Amino acid sequence: MQKIYLDNAATTPIDPEVMKEMYRVMETYYGNPSSIHAHGREARTVVEKARKTVAGLLKASPAEIFFTSGGTEADNMAIRSAVADYKLEHAITSKIEHHAVLHTLEALEKAGDIRLSYVRVDQQGHINLEHLEELLQANPRSLVSLMEANNEIGTLTDLKGVGEICARYNAIFHCDTVQTMGHYRHNLQDLKVHFITCAGHKFHGPKGTGFLYINPAIKINPLIYGGSQERNMRGGTENLYGIAGLAKALEIAYSHLDEHQQYIQGLKSYMIEQLEKEIEGVSFNGDTHPEKSLYTVLNVSFPEMDMADMLLFNMDIAGISCSGGSACSSGTNIGSHVLEGIGVHPNRPAIRFSFSKLNTKEEIDYTVTKLKTAMDSLL
């Protein structure tokens, strides 16, 4: 049976060149980067070289990059530390953010540390910038946490626009860039943002590694205490091999970014065309315009059916891996908070297809054929 992987927003296959680099580091550098002897110093060089690589690609300083275990830890570090260290009493987010952000802010609100406001979004998931400004006019010096691209529907946020509004009201701006890192270029010298986050496994790097960028204007205390690693900002022995792999993956992504973006956008546009041609009643959640949508993600709603939960199951049986929503909630019966937040009809089954440089048009054709067969049997 043919096997097709269309769940790249959840995680991507690791690039062979990344594996090769990680194996080289594993084989050669086994010292603890915090040790002062020669083996430790050699390992430390690997970490600092990776930091310099990441910073250079993002037009940042190496002193502004802090390696973490992934995007969730980076989000928690930015949000919790900013609220605590700047004595912030109010935060603004949207109801369609990733749970790494939403659940963290909700926990802080429940503990009585902050008041939480939600900026309005439209039916495509776009942030209402006028409402954001109204919230900041009433609550200046807030924490604003908004993602650059939604992980379920792909709608892009105007990162520059949000940053400029935040700057006018002296707000601290945290942006979850987990879905866009390695897929778009980021020039942090031109962005008015205080924190951005990354997870290496979203762009063909290893799982269990990521980073947090901290603007030099911001000074926060660690989320994880222990040793003096990451310049006293994150205790714990560094994931040496993961860090080396992340840097290599980001380097590869940037070196082929325009080529891959054009290719993957072509796959997404082709799938939209084929779905509209072959399956009556489909619609697309989020903005699908190439300039306003993450080119790796396509969220599709299908006509109402009695056995809606069987559609995703049938895809799995056919050898096609895709998602009914955020991967962080897969395996549960909880519906998508993102689709609910933009008003998608709850009785219409929705599937997220997410693409990478490794997918092909032939795989899209096979997937659409299997979808059509499944729909015919379920309606």
Image (cartoon, helix red, strand yellow):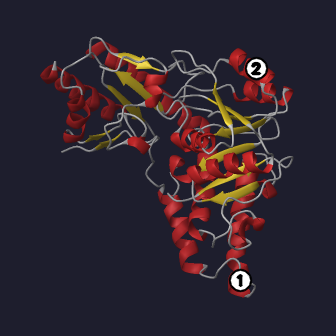
- The local crowd at label 1, few if under 14, some if 14 to 19, many if 20 or more residues have their Cα within 10 Å, is few
Q: Is residue 336 visible?
A: yes
Residue 308 occupies quadrant:
top left
Q: Quadrant of the N terminus?
A: top left
Above or below, comparing residue 102 to residue 373 in the picture:
below
Q: Is residue 239 left or right of residue 235?
A: left
What is the number of the mark on residue 35? 1
Q: Secondary structure at mark 1?
A: loop
Q: Is residue 101 left or right of residue 15?
A: right
Query: What amino acid is found at the position of numbered circle 1 in the picture?
Result: Ser
Q: Is residue 79 left or right of residue 337?
A: right
Q: Nearer the viewer, mark 1 or mark 2?
A: 2
Q: Residue at x 63, y 59 (%)?
A: 68
Of 234 and 274, nearer the camera is: 234
Q: Residue at x 58, y 73 (%)?
A: 25
Image location of residue 316, percent across then percent down:
24, 40
Q: Is residue 255 visible?
A: no
Looking at marks 1 and 2 on the same chain, the residue that comes earlier in the sequence is marked by: 1
Image location of residue 335, percent across then percent down:
37, 31
Residue extending farthest bottom: 37
Above or below, comparing residue 3 to residue 144 in the picture:
below
Above or below, comparing residue 243 to residue 176 in the picture:
below
Q: Which residue is mark 2?
A: 133
Q: Residue at x 37, y 23 (%)?
A: 300
Of 160 and 255, nearer the camera is: 160
Query: What amino acid is found at the position of numbered circle 2 in the picture?
Result: Glu
Q: Are marks 1 and 2 in contact (CB under 8 Å)?
A: no
Q: Residue at x 57, y 36 (%)?
A: 259
Residue 322 occupies quadrant:
top left
Q: Secondary structure at mark 2?
A: helix
